[in-house]
Image: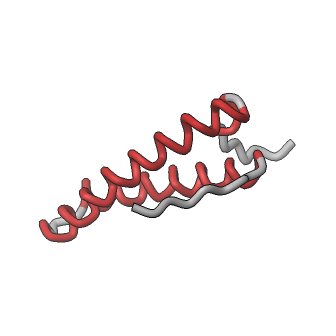
Amino acid sequence: MKTLNLELTHWQTQRILEALTELDAKWANVCQTSDDEDEVADYGNDLIELRMTLEAVKTKAMGVFGPGVAKFDRTPF
């Protein structure tokens, strides 16, 4: 299997984690609300892989940047 290694800044890493987290919520919603069994199966399988990826990225990111990298507060200052 081929792999990809990237060097990312704190900001880039945080945006990737935020996007993966939003995608997780979207796919989980499809699994919970869809009446189409095939759609639920497809999204469910992909959701498992997505969550494994998210957990791996989050663990490595927190080790480098600290727990703040996984916080996505958009509240204005």
Q: Quadrant of the N terminus?
A: bottom left
The answer to whether 6 is drawn above or below residue 37 in the figure is above
Q: x%, y% of residue 22?
A: 51, 55
Query: In this orientation, which residue lies closer to the viewer: 5 or 69?
Result: 5
Display colour scheme: secondary structure
Quadrant position of the C terminus in the picture:
top right
**For residue 49, side relative to residue 66 (left or right):** left
**What residue is at 72 percent from the left and 53 percent from the top?**
7
Question: In the picture shown, does residue 66 fall above or below 26?
Answer: above
Q: Residue furthest right?
A: 77
Q: Nearer the viewer, residue 65 or 26?
A: 65
Measured as percent of width and height from the top left, residue 31 is found at: 26, 57
- Name which residue lies at 70% across and 29% down: 66
On the image, the x and y values in percent for residue 34 come to 22, 64
> From the viewer's perspective, is residue 75 above or below residue 3?
above
Residue 57: image x %, image y %? 54, 44
Residue at 64%, 33% (x, y): give it. Answer: 62
43 vs 67, left or right, is left
Task: Give the mark count.
Answer: 0
- Is 46 on the left or on the right of 65, as rendered? left
Query: Residue at image x 56%, y 39%?
Result: 58
Q: Quadrant of residue 26?
A: bottom left
Q: From this viewpoint, which residue is outermost toward the left?
A: 37
Q: Quadrant of residue 37?
A: bottom left
